Image (spheres, rainbow, N blue to C red):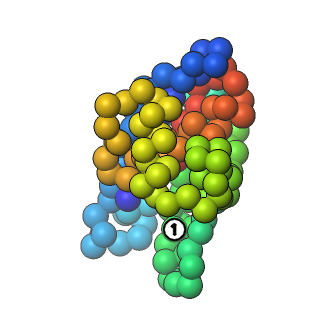
Amino acid sequence: MTGFGVLEMEGSRLRFLEAGVLRAPATAPMEQRLARLSVGLREVLARHQPHEVAVEDIFVKVDPKAALAVGHGRGALLAVVGEAGLPATSYPPATIKKALTGSGRAAKDRVARMVAAVLGLGQVPEPLDATDALAVAITHALAVNGKRALGR
């Protein structure tokens, strides 16, 4: 599962377009899970036609198996972005947290509340994977100023 968030920035105003998660059955073979994620991302790109894509850098504490699985998913999704001819920018988790909260060590729930506040949403988007993606999109949209951005 991976989250995505789509925003549009007009001047200094951010507009929420969509957020959600791309899912693949955990029991499916790796190649089928990667294919499912790729198809899902192609659908999001087709719906919104973003100009920019932003992704969070991989952060895995100690589990090399988890890092490899995350890396496979990230690679598959970046390949789809490349197919679409879109530039992708990567941000470390601390940069994203700092952009939203002022602290690179902010807790996940604090970042989620700031995402909701910045976008004028009544509540924090669920699941948190989608909120995380919106945080990436906000960070990137502020950096690119005025273009449609997709965070993943």
Residue 41 visible here: no
Residue 7 visible here: yes
Counting every numbered tag in the picture gives: 1
* Residue at x 37%, y 63% (from the top left corner): 32
98 or 138, which is in the foreground?
Answer: 98
Residue 141 position in % (x across, y down): 63, 32
139 or 40, which is in the foreground?
Answer: 139
Q: Quadrant of residue 120?
A: top left
Q: Is residue 119 left or right of residue 22?
A: right
Q: Quadrant of residue 76?
A: bottom right
* Residue at x 32%, y 59% (from the top left corner): 24
* Residue at x 46%, y 52% (from the top left corner): 110
Q: Is residue 58 above or below residue 11?
A: below
Tell me the quarter of the image containing the N terminus. bottom left
Residue 2 position in % (x across, y down): 42, 55
Callout 1: SS: helix
* Residue at x 49%, y 72% (from the top left corner): 69
Residue at the spot of label 1? 70
102 or 62, which is in the foreground?
Answer: 102
Q: Quadrant of residue 137?
A: top right
- Label 1 amino acid? Val
79 or 63, which is in the foreground?
Answer: 63
Q: Is residue 43 left or right of residue 59?
A: left
